[in-house]
Image (spheres, rainbow, N blue to C red):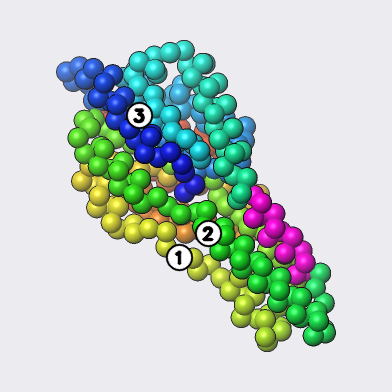
Amino acid sequence: MKRVLWLAGLIIFSLVMIAEGSGPKEGDVPRNFVLFFEVLDYTRELGDAVTYFFNEVLQPGDQLIVYTPARVYGFSKITLARPKRELIATMQEKLRGDTAVCSSNYKIIINDMKNQARDIENSETATADGQAGLKNSLVVYRQDMDNLQALRKVNVTLLMQIANMFKTQQGKNHMVMMYQAEFRPIPNKDTLSRLRAIPIISFQAIELFSSDSQKVPLDAEKFIDIFAEVPLTLHFLYIKPKDASSVQDFKEHSADMYDVFAKIAKATGGIVETTANPEAALKSLVQAIGESAK
């Protein structure tokens, strides 16, 4: 997860809860939300999701902290009492700007991978010089993949701190993660078939462009146990374009994150949704939270 200023955000959230939370009325169950945006592109659909979350998910008395890709924003009960239109416009602006700033390095790497994939498609493999150029492109692509992985680290310490913070927080605690599916460029199908037919390159090509093996980003079982003790419910909303399966020259690159966080979410009683429309997924969240309160 690509995050900065985590510690500051945790301090803000703790102060909001302690200093400005007046305590629930008898019979009321306070609700506390942590909303993560793990996204690379700000879209109209994300803006609509922000609108829906503030208008339909949040209720009087709730408290909220929002993690964008760059910063954290704390919302106390007092802050959330301000006009919804004002809160929504501000949060949309912050999310748009923070996403643009923090995705730039990621997109530079993706663009270079696209260039390498096109070079591989155009490579001449019948000569020794052509195969040497192809090998060089494969090496550069591999380095790009390593650089990409360096930007995809899960902050385990942050998750531990959030869990510890909620141990003493009364009420229903929900962590909602909106994760935008990642895709990396690969050579087209004809090129992949051609590479598999070259003995000295076949294994490397399969490893780079066909294998789904990725290192597990964190210990899911560990966090299932931790969240169960808090308690903290994780809801995992996986945002994936409708036409993603029809894009032949891109490969999904976030199955590792999906597998881990979907597993944790299910174990904590949260929802898991794969959708092109995050607002629709939030409607499922509202229903799930409503049913759990019965």
Mark 1 and mark 3: span between their CA atoms?
33 Å
Q: Residue at 45% of width from left, 24% of height from top?
A: 54
Real-space Cα distance between discs 3 and 2? 30 Å
What's the residue type where badge 1 is placed?
A: Lys
Q: Residues within 10 Å of mark 2 (few under 14, many from 20)?
A: some
Measured along the vertical axis of the image, is residue 94 above or below residue 136? above
For the record, the magenta segment spans 107-121
Q: Position of residue 142 (x, y in %)?
A: 61, 68
Q: Answer with left or right where residue 185 lies relative to residue 214.
A: right
Q: Is residue 147 left or right of residue 1?
A: right
Q: Residue at x 59, y 39 (%)?
A: 101
Question: What residue sits right under mark 1 in the picture?
Answer: 215
**Rendering quarter of residue 171:** top left
Determine whether the residue tagged by mark 1 lies in a helix, strand or loop. Answer: loop
Location of mark 3 (residue): 12
Q: Nearer the viewer, mark 1 or mark 3?
A: 3
Of the two numbered discs 1 and 3 on the same chain, state the one appearing first in sequence: 3
- CB atoms of marks 2 and 1 within 8 Å: yes
Residue 122 on image: x %, y %: 81, 69
Q: Please give the residue where the numbered disc 2 appears in the rendered image.
A: 149
Q: Amino acid at mark 3?
A: Ile
- Tell me, yes or no, whether the two marked residues, 1 and 3, touch with CB atoms within 8 Å: no
In the rendered image, residue 65 lying in the magenta stretch gets the answer no
| Earlier-in-chain disc, 3 versus 2 | 3
- Of residue 4 and residue 114, the one placed in the foreground of this image is 4
Observer-side mark, 3 or 2, equals 3
Residue 46 in sight in this render: no
- Main SS category, magenta section: helix
